[in-house]
Amino acid sequence: MPTATIKLFLVHGDPKRLRTAELSNWSGKAVAGPRSEFDGILAREESQQSGVYLLAGTDPETGKPAIYIGEAECIKDRIKAHLSKDFWNQIAYFVSKDENLTKSHIRYVEGRLIEQTIKAKRCIITNGQGSGSKLPESDREDMEVFLTKVYQLLPVLGIELLMAVSEKDVLGGKKHELLHCDIKNVKAQGYPVPNGFLVLKGSEAVHRERPSVEKWPWPKNMRQKFLEDGVLINRGDKLEFSEDVEFSSPSAAAAVIQGGHANGLTAWKSSNGFTLKDMESV
């Protein structure tokens, strides 16, 4: 993604409450905040414009992150209809400051946002699929630029569900040295990311947990959840990651791979044998 200057305005001075966001040399604008600020968010003039909106929260049945992505010619009127949905606790919507977004434009953007969310596989999309829209080539390119700005602002506004964890640094043009976590006949690869540590698809984990999980059960519980969700696949004598998985820390990643308590700073090593601890102390 290109470099950008973000203008973030905290309406009440609190970063968790109502806020607006703009990018330099961009005609778009974002408004975001928690559900508790619902009235203030919809009282703003921007809510009467056409645009796209996202409602993010947690699915009450599965406990997984969930999101609703929609479009409206009047955002205020449409979002009011979503008060019956209790899963969401964050809202963000995007409009154009020069009010040049047509119905076709916002339907196209909505469809592309849903496509990206499905591709990311980070949450449940509660509205299934968008209507989408065909646009002339020039308009389509304009909306792709608009989408790029939306992707830049969403993490700043607290919504990261649209981007696959393995794409974050690729889009930023940053390359990482792969680190290895090997134990017995098991081999895993990954690297540090802004939110913790990313274990790559195809990495392996031991088949049986260590006795330490009886005292510290988190790795056992997480492995069981991954098996139920298909994130880990039983290969007989080992388990295999079916997709990239982001962990909160290198130790959390190593614990799942090794089946018990582990020190990620020493468990993860470079191809030259340097531990993550060695690399961070340079």
Image (cartoon, rainbow, N blue to C red):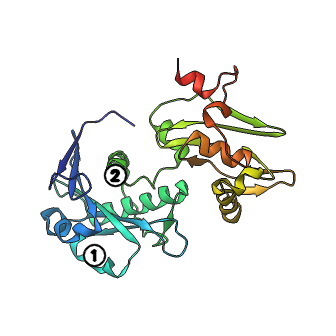
The amino acid on which the numbered mark 2 sits, given as a three-letter code, is: Met
Secondary structure of residue under mark 1: helix
Asked whether, in this view, residue 97 is left or right of residue 56, the answer is: left
* 55 and 192: which is toward the camera: 192
Indicate which disc residue 217 carries.
Answer: none
Q: What element carries label 2?
A: helix
Who's the residue at 35% across and 45% down the image? 152
Distance in Å between CA atoms under marks 2 and 1 = 22 Å
Of residues 3 and 177, the one nearer the viewer is: 177
Above or below: residue 242 compared with residue 108: above
- Callout 2: 10 Å neighbours few (<14), some, many (20+)? some
Question: Which residue in the structure is indicated by mark 1?
Answer: 78
Quadrant for residue 200, please give it: top right
Q: Nearer the viewer, mark 2 or mark 1?
A: 1
Q: What residue type is labelled 1?
A: Arg
Q: Which residue is drawn at 64% across and 37% down?
A: 263
Q: Earlier in the sequence, mark 2 or mark 1?
A: 1
Question: On the rendered image, what quadrant is the N terminus found in?
Answer: top left
* Residue 170 drawn at (x, y percent): 51, 37
| Residue 87: % across, % down | 41, 73
Taking the image as shown, residue 238 lies to the left or right of residue 23, namely right
The answer to whether residue 164 is left or right of residue 33 is right
Q: Position of residue 231 (x, y in %)?
A: 67, 57
Q: Against 249, is 222 above or below?
A: below
Q: What label does residue 143 carry, if any?
A: 2
Q: Could you classify mark 1 by the number of other residues whose Cα lies within 10 Å: few (under 14), some (14-19), or many (20 or more)?
A: some
- Residue at left offset 56%, top offset 29%: 176
Q: Is residue 163 above or below residue 172?
A: below
Residue 262 visible in the picture:
yes
- Given residues 175 and 24, the one toward you in this image is 175
Q: Residue at x 23, y 70 (%)?
A: 38
